[in-house]
Image (spheres, rainbow, N blue to C red):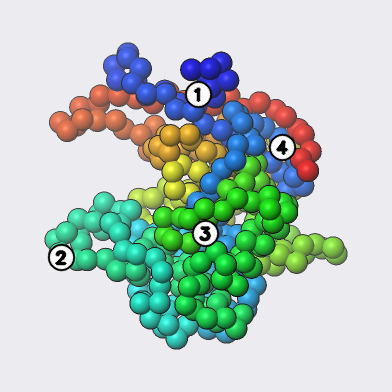
Amino acid sequence: MTAGATRSIAATIYRGEAIENTHIAHVAVVDARGRLLYAFGDPARMTLARSAAKPAQALAVLETGALERFGFDEADLALMCASHNSEERHIERTRQMIAKAHASEADLRCGGHPPLSDAVYRSWIKRDFTPGAVCSNCSGKHAGMLAAAQAIGSTVEDYHLPEHPLQVRVKHTVAEVCDLPDDGVQWAIDGCNLPTPAFPLERLARLYAKLADAAAQPAAAGASTHHAGLARIYRAMTTYPEMVAGEGRFCTALMRSFEGALVAKVGADASYAIGVRASEQTARLGADGALGIAVKVEDGNATVLYAIVADLLDQLGIGTAAQRAQLDAFRNPPMRNTMNVEAGRIALSVALEAVAATLP
């Protein structure tokens, strides 16, 4: 392991006193003006944001006028940003959305899969249930895009393909809100069959800082044309955190705990982003406006990711001790064997460094 990699070890898993695994991670903390305030590892790591990019993709849908045209509400918008548990409320709302959009489940270009929730999975096994496209954890995003394709006068067929007019629009919006040129974002295919962006980790943090900044204040003269949409997405996600993930999930627990003070979203294979509204706490950290935090764990370990994120909130002093304590089960996850004997522990070692650098 190189010296640089050693410095980026964010967590160590012990079994007894023996080291079982080490986990490399990267962290970027920025403010709404684009300044990198704190970092760990490589804050510029080119990162596939995966589902953490959903608010930016939902922004492109929102700006087509699809929500008004098809009668979608704020809970629908939250579901468009979701990686949900496939609970009945998530599936039923997806069905309602595609019905409002005069589409059918057959039009969705995501597939069914085992749910993210163990409780839901057990229920499906007992019922011998076979999940369809509406059960995908990304079904809300796809339902929104079916509506958006129609709102721009395009076809719903192949709405998921990179060259479809809707996806061309989505790509431009994602780049713009990350303050990048269109060719500054790389694109791949996500697990749900839609294009997924990759950009420097600090740009993911910047996106979430913008979400939180927009929610905290009305649009001023010269504000971005995206300001109102970002504010609306922030409010939808924080008002309906149960739609963004579900019971037992970190995103829902985090947003519930902080009661509207921050917005948060996970991306597959261990990326995470948080937008914190401006406060005395963010000002003390040197932020001009809201704060954005982005994390990527190199080996994709979600348990380690959530522990790091919870620890970062404590390091940065975000929220109250009581709010952060509600995340203790994620920060110090129990590691027990099949006989419920404690067999291991996680030791975190993310030491943020102050940077205070203005980025392009």
Q: Specify which label sits upstream in the sequence, 2 or 4.
A: 4
Badge 1 marks a residue whose secondary structure is strand
- Tell me the number on the disc at residue 36: 4
Q: What is the spatial separation of the Cα atoms under label 1 and label 2, in whole angstroms?
A: 43 Å
128 or 149: nearer the eye? 149
20 or 79: nearer the eye? 20
Residue 354 location in percent, x, y?
70, 28
Whether residue 239 appears in this view of the structure is no
Residue at (50, 72) in percent of width and height: 159
Mark 3 against mark 1, which lies toward the viewer?
A: 3
Q: Specify which label sits upstream in the sequence, 3 or 1.
A: 1
Whether residue 165 appears in this view of the structure is yes
Q: Specify which label sits upstream in the sequence, 4 or 3.
A: 4
Mark 3 against mark 2, which lies toward the viewer?
A: 3
180 or 306: nearer the eye? 180
Residue under numbered circle 3: 195
Q: Specify which label sits upstream in the sequence, 3 or 2.
A: 2
Amino acid at circle 1: Ile
Residue under numbered circle 1: 9
Q: Specify which label sits upstream in the sequence, 4 or 1.
A: 1
Report crowding for label 1: few under 14, some 14 to 19, many 20 or more residues within 10 A (C-alpha): many
Q: Residue furthest top?
A: 17
Q: Residue furthest front?
A: 163
Badge 4 marks a residue whose secondary structure is strand
Amino acid at circle 3: Pro
Q: What is the spatial separation of the Cα atoms under label 4 and label 1, in whole angstroms?
A: 21 Å
Residue under numbered circle 2: 127
Amino acid at circle 4: Leu
When the figure is inspected, residue 342 is found, relative to residue 195, above or below; the finding is: above
Residue 142 location in percent, x, y?
46, 69
